[in-house]
């Protein structure tokens, strides 16, 4: 969203206004206006989505930037009130499986149950995660599913926000791609998971960047070429990396991995542990290489040893994220999201605070 200071202050004043005589039953907030739908409030030309998985770190987020919290954790009424006070929506992330949509009764029950829960908690909409593989049969059901969700939610919650995840690239040779494009017509936003690219395209077994620059651009562009309105597209950037165990370490940038027999490529990030940005920043000063920049993939990495084993950590930092946020203007996207906002370090340590602030600022380059 990248709000100006004046804009942010005016929103704070707006958020404190309470309609005379208003009363909302069981509102958990100190001001009942915070339990009202945010439909009448300004929609920003650039959205910033913060994925939140639980805990209280949200108290330290940069609320001058956030337009929507995507919450996958336990319901926190305090978070809802705080977000609405800052004119930010809160949507619930929900997983839906093939079994939930292939039977009309199951689908209606799934939607109605979520709608009641979201109404009860004064939330602003829903973000869908597809639990089943997006094959031709499952994806074929998505357009009608999203349309029904949007219709029912709009009837009960004014200005409901509906969004869902899509893969990092729209493979035009598959039916799933066309079905996702059709489903997007009924959603407010689609979130392109522009990370874990190596799960799909490795041709050799070496540690590599999680979200390579050129592949990220190609993936986003594939959806625009299929006709999706670019203003509906949200670019997700990872606030995590991967800690690769080198089966054979040749040199920095040549960390050979063990081939593992899994479905798909011979090597994959699927068997490599994710590591949050806060832990990466703790490991980096102890590394044997220091931060190394790969100019082809436009991503940083470093090498460290654990016992006799070499490890190579590939991740994203303010420099690599800032490069990717240039896509917002270049491709006229709807906004950006980080996965997850909780992966930064919100301790009182001044160095950690500075690095976390840099990550937030990278989302909104000048």
Image (cartoon, rainbow, N blue to C red):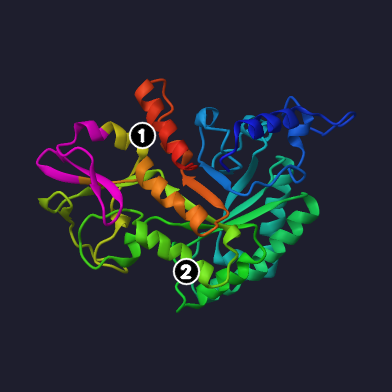
Q: Position of residue 237 (x, y in %)?
A: 44, 49
Say if the magenta span includes residue 95. Answer: no
User: What segment carries the magenta color?
Assistant: 283-311
Place residue 240 in its image quadrant: top left
Which quadrant of the figure contains the N terminus?
top right
Above or below for 55 versus 238: above
Q: Nearer the viewer, residue 290 or 204?
A: 290
Mark 1 or 2, nearer chain start: 2
Element type at marker 1?
helix
Instruction: Determine which residue is flagged by label 1.
Output: 278
Task: Give the tally of numbered discs.
Answer: 2
Q: Position of residue 19 (x, y in %)?
A: 85, 31
Instruction: Determine which residue is flagged by label 2.
Output: 222
Residue 317 appears anywhere in the view: no
User: Is disc 1 surrounded by few (<14), some (14 to 19) or many (20+) residues within 10 Å?
Assistant: some
Above or below for 53 versus 116: above
Is 315 situated left or right of 259 in this image? Answer: right
Q: Nearer the viewer, residue 119 or 20?
A: 20
Marks 1/2: CA–CA distance: 32 Å
User: Is disc 2 surrounded by few (<14), some (14 to 19) or many (20+) residues within 10 Å?
Assistant: some
User: Who's the residue at 23% across and 54% down the image?
Assistant: 207
Q: Position of residue 25 (x, y in %)?
A: 82, 34
Instruction: Name the front one of labels 1 and 2.
Output: 2
């Amino acid at each position: 969203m990248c709000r100006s200071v004046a804009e942010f202050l005016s929103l704070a004043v707006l958020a404190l206004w309470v309609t005379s005589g208003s009363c909302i039953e069981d509102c958990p907030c100190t001001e009942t206006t915070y339990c009202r739908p945010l439909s009448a409030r300004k929609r920003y030309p650039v959205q910033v989505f913060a994925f939140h998985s639980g805990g209280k770190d949200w108290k330290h987020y940069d609320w001058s930037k956030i337009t929507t919290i995507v919450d996958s954790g336990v319901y926190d009424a305090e978070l809802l009130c705080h977000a609405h006070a800052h004119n930010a929506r809160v949507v619930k992330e929900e997983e839906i499986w093939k079994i939930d949509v292939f039977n009309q009764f199951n689908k209606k029950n799934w939607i109605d149950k979520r709608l009641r829960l979201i109404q009860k908690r004064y939330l602003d909409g829903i973000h869908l995660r597809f639990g089943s593989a997006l094959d031709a049969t499952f994806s074929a059901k998505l357009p009608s599913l999203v349309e029904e969700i949007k219709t029912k939610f709009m009837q009960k919650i004014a200005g409901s926000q509906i969004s869902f995840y899509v893969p990092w690239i729209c493979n035009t040779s598959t039916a799933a791609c066309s079905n996702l494009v059709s489903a997007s017509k009924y959603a407010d936003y689609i979130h392109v998971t522009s990370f874990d690219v190596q799960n799909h395209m490795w041709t050799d077994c070496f540690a590599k960047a999680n979200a390579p620059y050129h592949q990220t651009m190609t993936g986003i562009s594939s959806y625009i070429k299929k006709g999706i309105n670019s203003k509906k597209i949200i670019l997700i950037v990872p606030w995590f990396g991967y800690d690769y165990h080198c089966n054979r370490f040749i040199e920095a940038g040549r960390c050979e991995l063990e081939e593992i027999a899994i479905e798909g490529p011979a090597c994959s990030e699927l068997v490599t542990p994710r590591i949050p940005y806060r832990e990466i920043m703790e490991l980096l000063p102890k590394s044997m290489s220091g931060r190394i920049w790969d100019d082809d993939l436009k991503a940083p990495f470093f090498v460290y040893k654990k016992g006799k084993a070499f490890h190579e950590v590939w991740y994203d930092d303010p420099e690599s994220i800032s490069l990717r946020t240039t896509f917002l203007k270049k491709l006229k996207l709807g906004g950006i999201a980080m996965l997850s906002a909780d992966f930064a370090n919100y301790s009182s340590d001044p160095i950690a605070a500075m690095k976390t602030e840099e990550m937030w600022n990278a989302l909104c380059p000048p």
